[in-house]
Amino acid sequence: MPKGYWIARFDVTDIEQYRQYVAANAAPLAEYGGRFLVRAGASESTEGANRERNVVVEFPSYDVALACYRSPGYQAAIALRQPVAIGEFLVIEGYDGPQPGESRA
């Protein structure tokens, strides 16, 4: 079964309140097995617009990623983020098929 991912890109207007969101999302992420793959590291926009903070979180499955997003704990965290961060948030299913250069046996 393919994994699930959150891809989030935000510009933050109040870093102190955003830190409250980060603290509040720790429990639901842990509960649903979320694991940071990207967490606001260096980035360069090679096509399109960039955002100040870019995050990718991996989950055991797409269904689990959606369940975490919809959970009461994460919804409470969102209430802290939304007034101080503008951007995009995507929940997406991973790909578990052949990769470039792999032969299909």
Image: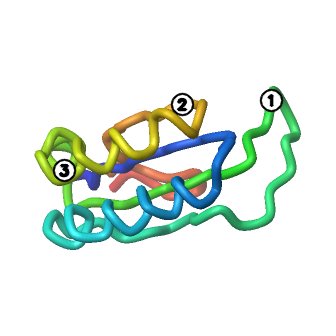
81 displayed left or right of 100: left
Residue 11 position, x and y percent, is: 68, 40
25 horizontally vs 73: left or right: right
Cα–Cα gap, marks 1 and 2? 12 Å
Q: State the image coordinates of residue 34 (x, y, percent, origin top left).
A: 29, 66
Nearest to the observer: residue 67 or residue 98:
67
Quick check: marks 1 and 3 in contact, CB under 8 Å? Answer: no
Local SS, label 3:
helix
Dot 2 or dot 3: first in sequence order is 3
Residue at (73, 40) in percent of width and height: 51
Q: Nearer the viewer, residue 52 or 7?
A: 52
The residue depicted at 62 percent of the width and 41 percent of the height is 10
Q: CA distance from mark 2 to mark 3?
A: 17 Å
Tell me the SS state at disc 2.
strand
Residue type beneath disc 3: Cys
Q: Type of residue at label 1?
A: Ala
Quarter of image, res 70: top left
Which sits in the foreground, 100 or 1? 1
Residue to which mark 1 is pinned:
49
Query: Residue 58 placed where, x, y %?
Result: 36, 61
Q: Earlier in the sequence, mark 1 or mark 2?
A: 1
How far across and how far down the image is residue 100, in percent?
Answer: 58, 51
Q: Which mark is residue 59?
A: none
Q: Amino acid at mark 2?
A: Glu
Q: Identify the residue position indicated by label 2 in the image.
A: 88
